[in-house]
């Protein structure tokens, strides 16, 4: 069982930036960020393959968000820049021991989420 703890969310004006963190209690094959806005389904944002550092992004965030990892701290990050009101959501960290992907069903472990609110 892997425990995931997110941090770094907050209230920011449009055009602003935040850095989200996801600390893990154990090693995993891949980790990802998803987000869920009120009344909407949870959607994929980005994933990273832990061993290779390979990454993949949703089109909606490509060029604005950057996913990265720190092996020594066993922590994943999401740098979010040029924020828009449509980015307002609870951001969730996810992890899996066997695979990566864009589907919520690919991930066995989830954090509690961190709220990002972007004001216009």
Image (spheres, rainbow, N blue to C red):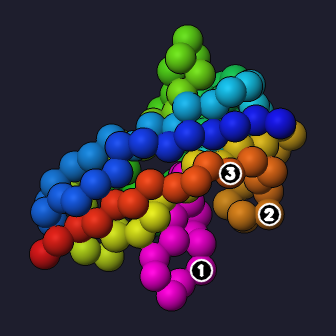
Nearer the N terminus, badge 2 or badge 1?
1
- What residue lies at 46% left-to-right and 64% top-to-bottom? 90
Which region shows up in magenta?
A: 33-46
Residue 26 lies in quadrant:
top right
Q: Residue at label 1?
A: 41
Visible in this render: residue 58? no
Q: Residue at label 2?
A: 105
User: What's the distance in space between the residues labelled 3 and 2, CA to CA?
Assistant: 11 Å
Marks 3/1 in contact by CB < 8 Å: the verdict is no
Q: Secondary structure at mark 2?
A: helix
Q: Secondary structure at mark 1?
A: loop
Residue 110 badge:
3
- What residue lies at 72% left-to-right and 64% top-to-bottom? 103
Q: Of discs 3 and 2, which sits in the foreground?
A: 3
Nearer the N terminus, badge 3 or badge 2?
2
* Position in image of residue 28 (x %, y %): 75, 31
Residue 20 lies in quadrant:
top left
Q: Is residue 89 left or right of residue 110?
A: left
Vertical comparison of 70 with 20: above or below: above
Q: Is residue 39 magenta?
A: yes
Q: Of discs 3 and 1, which sits in the foreground?
A: 3
């Amino acid at each position: 069982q892997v425990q995931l703890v997110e941090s770094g969310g907050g209230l920011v004006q449009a055009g602003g930036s935040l850095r989200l963190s996801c600390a893990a209690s154990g090693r995993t094959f891949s980790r990802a960020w998803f987000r869920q806005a009120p009344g909407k389904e949870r959607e994929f944002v980005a994933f990273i393959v832990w061993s290779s550092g390979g990454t993949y992004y949703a089109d909606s965030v490509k060029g604005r968000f950057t996913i990265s990892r720190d092996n020594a701290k066993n922590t994943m990050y999401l740098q979010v820049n040029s924020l828009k009101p449509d980015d307002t959501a609870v951001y969730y960290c996810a992890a899996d021991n066997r695979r990566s992907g864009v589907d919520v069903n690919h991930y066995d472990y989830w954090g509690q989420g961190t709220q990002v609110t972007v004001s216009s």
